Image: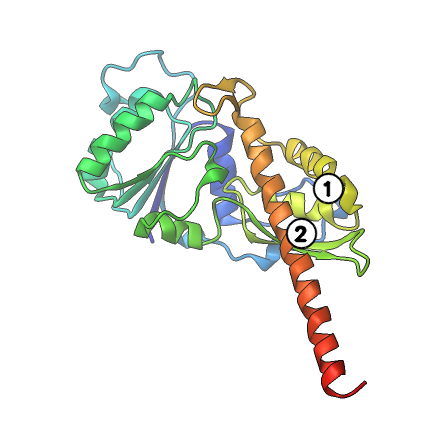
Amino acid sequence: MKILVLYSGELGRKVIQNLINPGNFCVSCGELCNHCRQARKSYANLIVGIHEFPEDLPTFIEEPDQYMPQKLPECDLILAIGIHPDLLIALPDVVKKTKAKAVIAPAEDSKKTPAGVLEQLRKELEAMGVEFEGPRPFCALEKTGKPVIDAFVDLGFGRPVLRIEMSPDGKMFIGAGVLRDAPCGSTWFVAKKLGWTDVSDYKETISGAHHSYPCTASMDKDPQLGDTILHKAGYIIREAAEDAMECARKEKSRILASSRNEASSSGL
């Protein structure tokens, strides 16, 4: 897969760093860092181009071509992160030049990335036979049967998926791992903070870690969600932890049942 990143703002920088996965990307744990991210490979070789747009562009852009890079590489997927609405509308022309098969344009702030603009972009791209997703927020991205976008999720980016280990009595988290990461990279930080904490405090632990990373989503109420996008991101990682906790409990029950069956079979 060849990925072209067009971005403006902090989220775009975090997504790029998360894809590249350099050793100095996540410093949230400070001196307590155990280099957990070394278990995950770098996808720097998939990035064929990066272009950062300034954040102080005019309110209205009549000629988007004036701000677009003159040379763009061919690619399979365009990540358009936090860019000006008028530049988003111009993406079909970029798609034609790059022969992109898919576009992901996440919405972390409804003022900067209006729902109406994303819907117009969706219609134009799908009419061209190009896959499109506009997750709100980026960590809401899931597989939907679109081959290129699903391949990006399969790399390990989208709605977070955790693996959790609990103490025998089920009262403590003794470890957590990342099976799928939020595109910004926050899932690793949350997983690290869950280790050796009380299960009963998981909501507070996750909320604190999510805010401390920090999440870059807007705190303004989003009309589409009826809540803030930051809160939505917080619910997503909490649900990921709850799903992982349920899987851990089911696995424990399965092991216990298997042990009982073996004991019964041996006549013990």
Residue 25 seen from this side:
no
Q: Nearer the viewer, residue 253 or 106?
A: 253
Residue 160 percent location from the top left of the image: 54, 46
Which amino acid type corresponds to the residue marked 1 in the rendered image? Tyr
Q: Secondary structure at mark 2?
A: helix
User: Label 2: few (<14), some or many (≥20) within 10 Å?
Assistant: many
Nearest to N terminus: mark 2 or mark 1: 1
Q: Nearer the viewer, residue 163 or 26?
A: 163
User: Label 1: few (<14), some or many (≥20) within 10 Å?
Assistant: some
Image point 71% across, 53% down: which residue? 34
| Disc marking residue 245 | 2
Residue 194 percent location from the top left of the image: 72, 46
**Looking at this rendering, what residue extends furthest in the top direction?**
59
Q: Is residue 186 left or right of residue 208?
A: left
Image point 25% across, 22% down: which residue? 64
Q: Secondary structure at mark 1?
A: helix
Residue 51 percent location from the top left of the image: 37, 34
Which amino acid type corresponds to the residue marked 2 in the rendered image? Met
| Disc marking residue 36 | none
Image point 80% across, 46% down: which residue? 198
Q: Is residue 122 left or right of residue 33?
A: left
Image quarter in which the N terminus is found: bottom left
